[in-house]
Image (cartoon, rainbow, N blue to C red):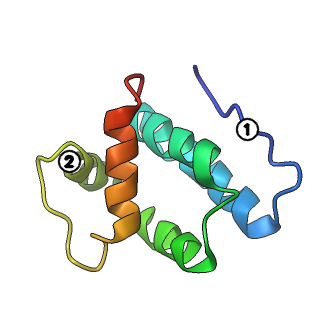
Amino acid sequence: MTGSTRSSSGLDDRRKRLLFRCWHRGTREMDLILGRFADATIGELSDRELGELEHLIEVPDPDLYAALTGDKVLPAEYATALFARIKAFRVADPSA
């Protein structure tokens, strides 16, 4: 898989923008992790979770990847339940 499998059709502008940003991170590893997570969940995320995702994707790729793989601890402001959900999703998805 090399890109989004979810259409942005039917999504509001905020969700469309986040879906795009999750698939266009800068490093392929983070594209695959966040993009697949967004494909699977973007339609069901609450406004609060969307805000957390918007905040989380501001973390530089190397730092976020290291946190997702357990090599680094994120600052508390980013270590939310949504981050834990993304981390669990990455582990559950053997292709991510």
Locate residue 60, reporting x and y percent. 34, 58
Which of the 4 image quarters holds residue 73?
bottom left
Q: Indicate the position of residue 84 as horizontal and vertical percent values.
A: 31, 59
Q: Front-most of 45 and 53?
A: 45
- Looking at the image, the residue that sits furthest to the right is 10
Element type where label 2 sits in the image: helix
Q: Amino acid at mark 1?
A: Arg
Q: Looking at the image, is mark 2 or mark 1 nearer the viewer? A: 1
Q: What residue is rendered at 21% in x and 77% in y?
A: 76
Q: Residue at x 12, y 54 (%)?
A: 72
Q: Which residue matches tag 1?
A: 6
Amino acid found under the numbered disc labelled 2: Ala
- Residue 70 seen in the figure: yes
The quarter in which the C terminus is drawn is top left
Is 49 placed above or below 7 here?
A: below
Local SS, label 1: loop
- In the image, residue 66 lies at what x, y percent? 20, 47
Left or right of 36? Residue 60 is left
**Vertical relation: 21 (above or below) 27:** below
Can you say whether 79 is above or below 90 in the image? Answer: below
Q: Which residue is mark 2?
A: 66
x 63%, y 29%: residue: 3
Residue 59 in sight: no
Give the left or right position of residue 8, taking residue 96 as reference. Answer: right
